[in-house]
Image (tube, helix red, strand yellow):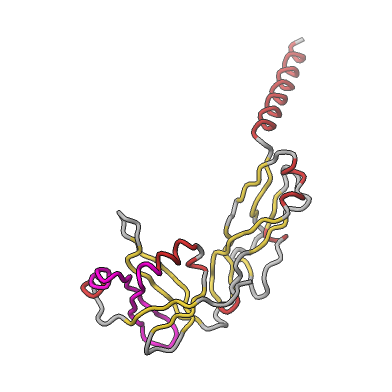
Amino acid sequence: MAGEIPDLVALERSGTGKGAARQARRNGMVPGIVFGGDTDPLPINIPFNELIKRLRAGRFKSTLFNLKVEGQEDVRVICRDVQRDVVKDLPTHVDFMRLRRTTKINLFIPVEFINEDAAPGLKRGGVLTAVRPEVELVVTAGDIPDHITVDLTGMQIGDTATISGVNLPAGSKPTIDRDFVIANISAPSGLRSADAEEADGEAGGEGEGGEE
């Protein structure tokens, strides 16, 4: 489960519009907006270097932050959008949404695979394919999981791991009602080729027998 909620420090942005946003970027800041709840939208600036560090650490859009802005009460937020420069791929604007601890939200949660050494199919050379490296769940804002765990123990070549076999965190559920595949173990390419050749050979033999 998620641990302590990390702080994200920002400054209140004076002025709105493109001119204020451009000035913020010249000052080494990334402009943003905080919306939602029963409060008016709050324009903010986030230090560019701090935001880049957070983005590179991963899972930025699935992390609940404690936003600290001088002169404002701390508030829990989650990122809803990061706009980027189309050429440099650097962040140019960030949107955050205010959340209560009990708020239900949809998030993509990473999948972690364990006990690969206990999967006979992998020991035989099978290949693990993560069909869904992330799964969209409905989660509670105050209890966002870091990941969900898929246990590969006992899985053979041809087996699949589905969402119904995963122990989801309390209060979480998939956004898709039906059971769906998260990963599978497929035969190695060499074994698939051998099987195909064997099948072709059997087909050819049956054809020859039929002509006689």
Dividing the image into 4 quarters, which one contains the C terminus? top right
Residue 123: name its quadrant: top right
- Which residue is at the front of the view, 50 or 119? 50
- Is residue 49 within the magenta segment? yes
> Is residue 54 left or right of 104 when viewed as pictured?
left
Residue 133: name its quadrant: bottom right
User: Among all residues in the image, which is located at the extreme left?
Assistant: 19
Residue 195: name its quadrant: top right
- Residue 88 position in % (x across, y down): 31, 55
Q: Residue at x 52, y 71 (%)?
A: 63
Q: Residue at x 62, y 59 (%)?
A: 111
- Which residue is at the front of the view, 208 or 107? 107
> Is residue 41 left or right of 57 when viewed as pictured?
left
> Is residue 110 left or right of 124 when viewed as pictured?
left
Q: How many numbered marks have been drawn onto this rendered protein structure?
A: 0
- Which residue is at the front of the view, 27 or 19? 27
- Residue 178 position in % (x across, y down): 65, 61
- Is residue 200 within the magenta segment? no
User: Where 67 sits versus 130, above or below?
Assistant: below
* Highlighted magenta segment, given as a residue range: 22-50
Q: Residue at x 24, y 70 (%)?
A: 22
Q: Residue at x 54, y 74 (%)?
A: 105
User: Where 116 sits versus 170, above or below?
Assistant: above
